[in-house]
Image: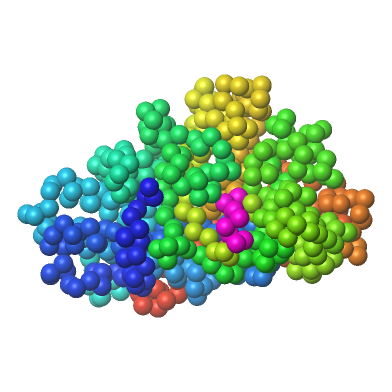
Amino acid sequence: MKYYSYILLLFLLTACVKLELTPPAEPSTASFYSNQTQLELAVNDLYKIDFWGNDNEQYTDNYWHRGQLGNAVTFGTMNADDAMVQNYWSLAYKAIGRVNAFLENKDKAAANTPAEIMTRLEAEMRLIRAYQYSRLITHFGDVPFLTTQLSLDEASSVTRTNKEEILTFIFAELDFAANNLPETYPASAIKRFTKGAALAIKARTALEMGKWTVARDASKAILDLTAAGVYALNPNYEQLFLKAGETSKEIIISIPRDEAQKVFTSGTPVQDQLPRNTGGFGAQIPTREMMDAYECIDGLPIDESPLYNPLDPFANRDPRLKATIVPFNSLWLGHYYQPHPDSITVFSTTQNARVSNRDCRTVATFASYTGLLWKKGIDQSWADKKSEDNDLILIRLGEILLTYAEAKLELGELDASLYEALNKVRARAYGVAVAETGLYPAISTVDPVELRKIIRRERRVELAKEGIRYMDLIRWRLAEKALTKPVIGLPDPTVQDRSKWPFPGVTPLDEDGIADYSGFGNQVKVVAQRNFDPSRQYLWPIPALEIRVNPNLEQNPNY
């Protein structure tokens, strides 16, 4: 059973998407909200996928899009007129406006709606509003704080409220939601937001805002639910992100997608992630930095481990590497994937013959520039249909375990529960029990500096391609380092020294795990240059359109 009904999804597709600080575009607040059905319609509309999502992984050093070369974040070109910024802001306030209208009018239905239904719907709405404010303050800082419906005149004169005040409100709203939402729903029922969902949003928000005690306690509450059987790590990391994993007990919040219900992605966005041999474009690809972040099976980074061989870079590595990035010379979607410049043909199992290797840049100029392709979350159906409808995972137990570990570290609480949380994630990667410490590189260091490095690296590889890395770079104040490095690709086939394929040496990693390719000369190629201005880009600009409508909104510094 998916988290929301497919009938609901059909309804959600019809909803409009434009900014509303005033009441939602419904029949009218005078006649709406008068019964349970109307209350549920108002709540259901805010489960729409447009209102939910983590950050784009392309904002980070993990992911690159050849066709776009960069984006406003990684090119450092973000400004107040950026359409992405305006859309992010508008959708958040559209949802907030609808929640405010609901809360002010819901009691019209009190006479004909059971009290427990009223309370549950209110809790869902307050969770939704808290989530939207969380996204706003983590990206924009101080923002307009609206908890009631506004007239047009009022909306055009609001000012920004200190983010700390809004954060206090967010935590209170999520506490209400956690106290009034069920832990689970029956298997036969439509699943909606739960107590764990409220706690997960609280834990993530607290971590992003540096509120370590709140992050620890909210995460611990989820771990208590896990001990009670509500949540569990999926035993197979790779399968979690495929169709088979959509009902996993690891998932705390996900957005359902289903092609039969017209909620799916097709065409170029899918083909961009597929091999060229299967009709894809190999354009949205992992960076070399992403690959180099995975440690070896001895628990050491590649520039410290004697097990690492740059000529065989997938060997002796954290198993999540092969689950996330397609290994060289492995069968992938009906063809062997081999980007070696001399492999001009490969074997196709779909054709039972050797075919021209369009994933080799000797054959196809636009084959993956880094030589890498994403594997995580992709299966044969993507290649067969050139479409995909995997559920979008927003928050899962693996993230919460790492959030708990980081919060405990920053509080100086290096106790057994920290190591258990961290090692549960690592043990799952190796497919073993956490107690089997001889079968995976269990963490035991008591050096807080070293432990911080490990936790940060663990977040990067465990949560790769899930939209978490960007806010990690922002809150760790590492964006100015990571997002000013060039994107590195394989050298042109005419230049590459075949004896050093695929990688000419061991990549040096600094104390923050940031790779340095400057010493490899022409055996690597700069395919794009990132830029990040620390004087302004740790916050996004207030959209220029909003300031033109309301001059009381002050712009963030240096925009």
80 falls in the magenta region:
no
Image quadrant assignment for residue 316: top right
On screen, residue 506 versus residue 184, left or right, reads right
Residue 193 coordinates in the image, percent (x, y): 33, 47
Q: Name above or below for residue 213 compared with residue 291.
A: above
Image quadrant assignment for residue 548: bottom left
Q: Nearer the viewer, residue 505 or 381?
A: 381
Q: Nearer the viewer, residue 354 or 369?
A: 354
> Residue at the spot x=36%, y=77% of the render?
549
Q: Nearer the viewer, residue 517 or 57?
A: 57
Residue 28 coordinates in the image, percent (x, y): 17, 72
Residue furthest toward the front? 352
> Residue at the spot x=72%, y=63% of the render?
277
Q: Is residue 283 visible?
A: no
| Colouring convention used in this rendered image of the protein | rainbow
Residue furthest toward the bottom? 548
Q: Is residue 345 visible?
A: yes
> Residue at the spot x=64%, y=48% of the render?
324
Q: Name above or below for residue 300 compared with residue 197.
A: above
Q: Name above or below for residue 56 compared with residue 420.
A: below
Residue furthest toward the left? 111
380 falls in the magenta region:
yes
Q: Nearer the viewer, residue 121 or 240?
A: 240
Residue 63 coordinates in the image, percent (x, y): 64, 57
> Residue at the spot x=62%, y=27% of the render?
443
Q: Which residues are magenta?
A: 376-384
Residue 358 coordinates in the image, percent (x, y): 77, 65
Numbered circles on residues, count: 0
Image quadrant assignment for residue 440: top right
